[in-house]
Amino acid sequence: PSLPLRSVLLMDQGHPHPTPAARLRTLLDDAREASRCEVMPACHDALSARLIERAGFRVAFMSGFAVSASGLALPDAGLISYGEQLSVGQNICAAIDTRRLLVIGDGDTGFGGSGNVRRTIEGYAKAGFAGVSIEDQVYPKRCAYSGGVAVVPREEAVARVRCAIAARDEMRRRSGLDLVLVARTDCRRAEEDLDEVLWRCRAFAALGADVVYAEGLAPDELRRLCVSLGPTVHTMLAQVERPGVTLISQTEAAALGCRLSLFGLTVLSAAVSAMTRALEAMASGGHPSTGVLCDFGELKALVGFDALDAWEEEHQACPAVGQDGAAE
């Protein structure tokens, strides 16, 4: 498929390859043309991101809930800092081929005021993310599935998204770095009515957000949102496996008009479940069954031992260099 204009412009400005953001825009545009929805698993560290890449997914999401849980064993309630999330994001992007797997980073509220939003945009772009999500909760934010979710007034929500887009555009002009901006509203979780959801999403789209996302909508409400925004605006949904909740399939999500379907805790939940079963078996005097454990050779290959061994074998004959710069 042809590259978006922004990608071409970046290449003309001395960037020989399209940025991760440009490739993500192309993926989204292709999904829209094909009436397709991309499934987007969430990662929480470098290893989970590599597994997502190896499974063949084209886009992933760094979940703040999952990063806080796995890195700190703390709830997603504004307790994790910008620096802690950025550090995990840097490791994630370094562990994968960002030409194959595009990662959107959870930017929460931008971690503070307008200066914090700008810093978040620049830090995530430098880390190697393809996109960032910015939401309209009060700061510090809380997981959308917890109690006490509150959003800022609509004027402040619009100002925050405008700030994020301005920071992204200024960064792009100055350095060529880029990010897809996902503008998210949690006002439905804050018990606002659907009209407020639609108003905020239309406002975010009018500002130039690449993707618009409303948390907590029922399928019929999601359909109304997609119709309200029109076919040119990319939308997404997020799902968490919970009792009494029927998941929306990839086909159903595409029919609703969504281009991304995020499963924010599936990978983390699967990992916790497997670790729990293994530890329970060991605590009872037994040992985990073969089906629970990863093959040791596969594990070594996954973290790069095979590649490292091949590299060292190829370069083991390199002569040592003395202090005077001559080969010894």
Image: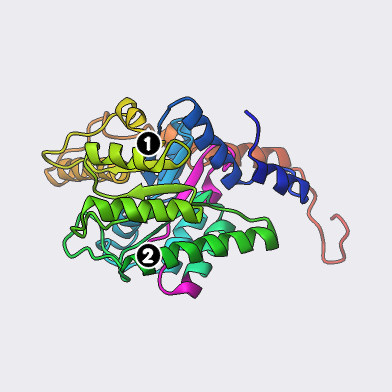
As drawn, is 319 to the left or to the right of 21?
right
**Circle 1 residue:** 258
Q: Are marks 1 and 2 in contact (CB under 8 Å)?
A: no
Please give the name of the residue rendered at 69% of the width and 63% of the height, measured from the top-left corner: 174
* Nearer to us in this view, 203 or 247: 203
In three-dimensional space, the C-alpha distance between marks 1 and 2, rounded to whole angstroms, equals: 22 Å
As drawn, is 93 to the left or to the right of 279?
right
Q: Is residue 13 above or below residue 5?
A: below
Look at the image and tell me whether residue 262 can be seen: no
Mark 1 lies on a secondary structure that is loop
**In x, y percent, where is residue 44?**
38, 51
Q: What amino acid is labelled 1 in the image?
A: Cys
The circle drawn on residue 48 is: none
Look at the image and tell me whether residue 277 can be seen: yes
Mark 1 is surrounded, within 10 Å at the Cα level, by few (under 14), some (14 to 19) or many (20 or more) other residues, namely many
Please give the name of the residue rendered at 15% of the width and 47% of the height, measured from the top-left corner: 283
**Circle 2 residue:** 157
Q: What amino acid is labelled 2 in the image?
A: Ala
104 magenta-colored: yes
Q: Quadrant of residue 278?
A: top left
Question: What's drawn in magenta, residue-wise?
Answer: 93-116
Which of discs 1 and 2 lies nearer the camera? The answer is 2
Please give the name of the residue rendered at 37% of the width and 45% of the height, measured from the top-left corner: 42
User: If the image is split into quadrants, where does the N terminus sit?
Assistant: top right
Please give the name of the residue rendered at 11% of the width and 38% of the height, measured from the top-left corner: 244
**In x, y percent, where is residue 198?**
31, 50
Mark 1 or mark 2: name the one nearer the start of the chain: 2
**In x, y percent, where is residue 209?**
48, 52
Mark 2 is surrounded, within 10 Å at the Cα level, by few (under 14), some (14 to 19) or many (20 or more) other residues, namely many
275 magenta-colored: no
Q: Quadrant of residue 11?
A: top right
* Nearer to us in this view, 35 or 95: 35
